[in-house]
Image: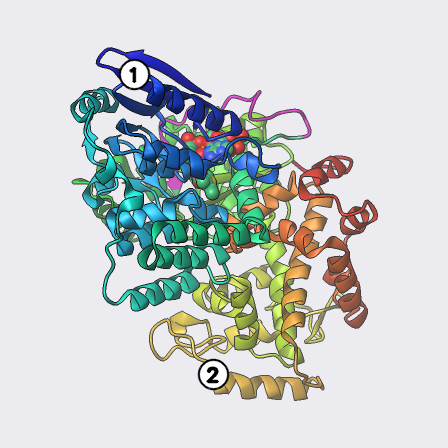
Amino acid sequence: MALYRRIPGAIAVITLTNPPVNALSCTVREAIYETVKRATADQEVKAIVLCGANGKFCGGADIKEFSREMRGPPLVPMIDMIEESEKPVVAVIEGVAFGGGLELALGCHYRIAHSGAQVGLTEVTLGLLPAAGGTQRLPRLIGVPAALDIITTGRHVSAQEAVRLGIVDKVTDSSAMEEAIEFAKTVAGEPMGPRRLSLWTAACPEDLDSLLEGALVRIRQRSRGALAPVACVQAVRAAASLPFAQGMKKEQELMAYLFTSGQARAMQYCFFTQRAAARWTTPSGASWENTKARPVRQAAVIGLGTMGKGIAVSLSRAGIPVIAVETEQKRLKAGRKAVNSMLTRESQKRGLAEAHLGSISFTLDLRKLRDTDLVIEAVFEDMALKKQIFSKLSSVCRPDALLCTNTSGLNIDEIASAASRPELVVGTHFFAPAHVMKLLEVVCGPRTSPVAVATAMQLAKRLEKIGVVVGNCSGFVGNRMMRPYTEQAYYLLEEGARPEEVDLVLEEFGFAMGIFRVMDLSGLDVGWRSRKELGLTGPKLPPGTEARSRGGKRYSPLPDILCESGRLGQKTGRGWYLYEKERVATPDPWLQSFLEDYRSRFGIQSRRVGQDEILERCLYSLINEGFRILQEGIAASPEDIDVIYVSGYGWPRHRGGPMFYAWMVGLPKVLDKLEHYHRTHPDIPNLAPSSMLRKLVARGSPPVHQWRALIQQHSSQL
Ligand SMILES: C/C=C(\C)C(=O)SCCNC(=O)CCNC(=O)[C@H](O)C(C)(C)COP(=O)(O)OP(=O)(O)OC[C@H]1O[C@@H](n2cnc3c(N)ncnc32)[C@H](O)[C@@H]1OP(=O)(O)O
């Protein structure tokens, strides 16, 4: 709702009241209409102040209403009505003014912000555009180039930048409300015509076309295939070239097109699932609601390799004092240098005068961890080494210290078996670079206690990461699903495709990089080491093993051959591609002839592999593994899998995540295709449709949010 009160000085104050973010729900819009009409009709009122309750102006339209039938007054005429008011309307921007919230403020005649506030036209992140006049008013207010950037990225703009750009008229460190009331008194009675943005002309550069072209190129690089940012560019073009009324018409047309698109639905799904991941539960009945996290006042990181360094920086940035431990003086020194320079760079980027250098201490002595609340072990993926460390930690650390292992797939239960308190052992799978990537898989072993899960999830929040609770199995959720995906990519090469063909299809789908470019970036030795550990290649392989078969299943030795011949990817200048210029991948003629020789050596008839087949075999095998994960209870819900993929594996947000995508494509189609590919490749068991997929199809393919209830009938590993 919106509360109305009259205060001395002939001011009407309208307060949006809809916790937690004062979203513009149907009731709020109705109340705004009513209260603005009341204020404009009241002879005693000379100016109107519009604010939000609880220190937040407005989080925009109520996103939950997008999936329901539209009720109540629309935003556009409501904002027009405010702009048309003869009495000045002053918006008080505290906390946030996002999306429709900022558009509402742009309809006001003045905007006064608190210094801690943020503004933004965030609709593009929900697959939409600012369709309450934002695409037309913002360019008129701050010019086309700045507005184009804000509208197409949806980025959050600080109050300081907002005043510099002219989005707000004033920023204050003290009470924005008091400032606005005093200001409103000074402008009462003035003509408001010059303050109506709809009457302004957008300042436009001469080379508008090249500005817009440049924006489209950046959009394609950032989010290939996404419709909303492209529509945003078209709407801004309209603001630059058409009168306001026609621009608004264009805005509405583009919005109608986006609103019904699957992409908007997918991105709104991502918005809610990301928040829902924090509300974890386990089948034992433990949950975020009934389990209290332990406070973490001091943490330690063991191992200052790539992951350890990033984790230490993340902890320090969150204000948690860290003890960083290494085994050798030389490594400690190198680690200290790298961490300090990462922190300095971070501080410079954030415009801080000093880095948090003081909050990390470096030591070779494990005994220094005796008072630590939480330890994150981040050494190599070596089970024996990890177990040794956990055994030592058990004797060094306090009995209630949480012991975390950063592993991308090792058995948490086995690691925990080396600790005297296995219930306090939890997996924390960070993603590289750990100080940048948002995802944290919180892995529960069978003995992990609810308090350990709660503490790790609380830590994720403090580190500004998205924690997702998963069960213990090889590769957990994310990496386990990657295996069939990468395997299909190798098989496609064996059958006739080229790396660049496979990558192009995946990039057209929306991944920032195709799988072969990803492997070249992370290094072919990473996968090779883990295959060696699993006995799929290397000395553990029994003599006489067939090159292209392991345990009766198809196997591709292609990545092993490349790796063993020194083609490790970008770091050696060649992998699946050639890197003559740093980081620029070019198709390698050598690889082409190598693949031809390989095919003839193994009697493989090369064929042209179509784009649909590439996409379906890669994605559906990954999705199929997702269904198996659900069936085994390794993930609590399809939503959790989708959050993992969108926030940790570059799955395009506008496709919602693998499980959501499967539902959008149609589960019967996914099932049908998997059956087809499995019939053609019976030696690839991953292609055999999972029983969970079959069950969902048999139940009429219910929407994703209904799957959880069906899954709960199965066993859970969480
Ligand atoms: C056309 C389209 C128009 C005109 C639009 O306006 S589209 C909406 C544009 N608005 C946004 O994009 C803002 C979205 N919200 C946020 O970015 C953040 O929620 C926040 C910065 C406003 C607050 O962040 P924080 O304090 O961390 O809190 P949460 O993100 O956890 O949110 C708390 C709960 O509020 C729900 N929420 C937030 N915004 C909206 C909204 N606009 N409509 C409906 N519900 C909203 C959010 O989902 C959280 O609830 P739960 O999901 O946890 O139940």
Q: Which of marks 2 and 1 is in front?
A: 1
Report the residue at 67% width, 66% height from top.
Answer: 617
Instruction: Mark yes or no: residue 580 visible.
Output: yes
> Which residue is outermost to the right?
698
What span is colored magenta in the figure?
Answer: 283-301
Estimate how packed mark 1 is, as few (under 14), some (14 to 19) or many (20 or more) residues with alpha carbons within 10 Å: few
Q: Give the SS element for disc 2.
A: loop
Q: Main secondary structure of the magenta part?
A: loop
- Type of amino acid at the residue the image marks with label 2: Asp
Q: In this view, does 628 lie to the left or right of 571?
A: right
Q: Distance between the residues labelled 2 and 1?
A: 78 Å
Residue 289 inside the magenta-drawn segment: yes
Residue 47 inside the magenta-drawn segment: no
Report the residue at 34% width, 53% height from top.
Answer: 243
Q: Residue 716 location, x and y as percent?
A: 71, 37
Q: Which residue lies under the disc numbered 1?
A: 43
Q: Give the SS element for disc 1.
A: loop
Instruction: Mark yes or no: residue 460 visible.
Output: no
Above or below — where is 240 with respect to 180? below
- Type of amino acid at the residue the image marks with label 1: Gln
Q: Which of 527 and 231 is in front in this view?
A: 231
Q: Which residue lies under the disc numbered 2?
A: 588
Q: Residue 43 location, x and y as percent?
A: 29, 16
Report the residue at 77% width, 56% height from top.
Answer: 668
User: First in sequence: mark 2 or mark 1?
Assistant: 1
Q: In which quarter of the image is residue 8?
A: top left
| Image quadrant in which the C terminus is located | top right
